[in-house]
C-alpha cells in the first residue's frame, strides 16, 4: 500500500513539474500587443428598429474594434491618420458595404486585409466572422478623432480616439 501511494506521489510530482507555473503565463504580451490593447476601442453597430407604430428597439448588427495606429507607430504614420479596423457580424453580407468618416472627412484609402496580417497580433481577434481593414485619412488638425462607421443595413457606430500630444 505504501509503495502505491509513494508511486502515485512521484507520478503527480513529475506531471506537475512539467506544467506551467501559473495561468498568468497565458497573458504574456509583446510591447506592441500591450500598446494595442491599451489603444483599442470597441463599439456595437446599431440601428433603431420600429416594432409597430408606437414602440422601437435598438438592434445590434455587428461589432467593431478599432486601433489608431499612429499611437503605436508614430514615426511610420506622420503624414496620415491610420486605423486598423476589425468587424464581426454573424451575417457577413452586412459587411459588404462600409462608409467611414473621420471628423466628417472621407478616407483617402481603404484596404481589405486578410485575417492574418501585420496588425492582427495587436488585437488577437481572428475568427470566421471577422473582416479586417486598414483605413487611411488625411492628417486631422483636431486632437480628438471621431471615426464614424456605417454598414449596409444602416447600422452605425462612432469610435473616439485621442491623440497623444507630441
Image: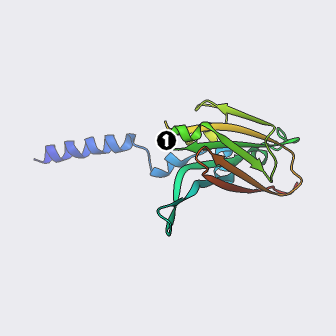
Residue projecting furthest to the front: 53
Taking the spot 49% from the left edge, 36% from the top edge, the residue there is: 128
Image x and y of residue 51, in percent: 47, 62
Residue 61's spot in the image, x, y percent?
53, 50
Q: Residues within 10 Å of mark 1 (few under 14, many from 20)?
A: few
State the residue lying farthest toward the bottom: 54
| Residue ranking furthest to the left | 1
User: Foreground: 84 or 155?
Assistant: 155
Color encoding of the figure: rainbow
Please report the residue visible at 88 percent of the width from the left and 54 percent of the height from the top.
166
Residue indicated by mark 1: 91
Of 39 and 130, nearer the camera is 130
What SS does tag 1 mark?
Answer: loop
> What count of labels does the image hold?
1
Residue at the image point whose x is 79% and y is 45% from the top: 70
Residue at 81%, 56% in the rendered image: 164
Measured from the top left, where is residue 77 in percent x and y? 83, 40
Name the side, left or right, on which 125 lies relative to 75: left
Q: Is residue 107 visible?
A: yes
Q: Is residue 30 visible?
A: no
Q: Quadrant of residue 86?
A: top right
Q: Name the residue nearer the viewer: 41 or 33.
A: 41
Can you give x and y, in whole percent of width and height, for residue 62 in the image? 55, 48
Amino acid at each position: 500500500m505504501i509503495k502505491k501511494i509513494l508511486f502515485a506521489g512521484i507520478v503527480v510530482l513529475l506531471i506537475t513539474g512539467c506544467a506551467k507555473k501559473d495561468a498568468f503565463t497565458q497573458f504574456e504580451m509583446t510591447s506592441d500587443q500591450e500598446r494595442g490593447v491599451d489603444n483599442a476601442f470597441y463599439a456595437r453597430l446599431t440601428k433603431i428598429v420600429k416594432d409597430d407604430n408606437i414602440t422601437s428597439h435598438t438592434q445590434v448588427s455587428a461589432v467593431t474594434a478599432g486601433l489608431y495606429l499612429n499611437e503605436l507607430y508614430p514615426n511610420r504614420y506622420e503624414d496620415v491618420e491610420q486605423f486598423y479596423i476589425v468587424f464581426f457580424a454573424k451575417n457577413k453580407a452586412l459587411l459588404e458595404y462600409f462608409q467611414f468618416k473621420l471628423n466628417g472627412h472621407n478616407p483617402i484609402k481603404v484596404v481589405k486585409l486578410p485575417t492574418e496580417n501585420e496588425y492582427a497580433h495587436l488585437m488577437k481577434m481572428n475568427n470566421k466572422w471577422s473582416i479586417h481593414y486598414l483605413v487611411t485619412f488625411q492628417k486631422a488638425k483636431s486632437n480628438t478623432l471621431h471615426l464614424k462607421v456605417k454598414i449596409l443595413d444602416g447600422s452605425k457606430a462612432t469610435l473616439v480616439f485621442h491623440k497623444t500630444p507630441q
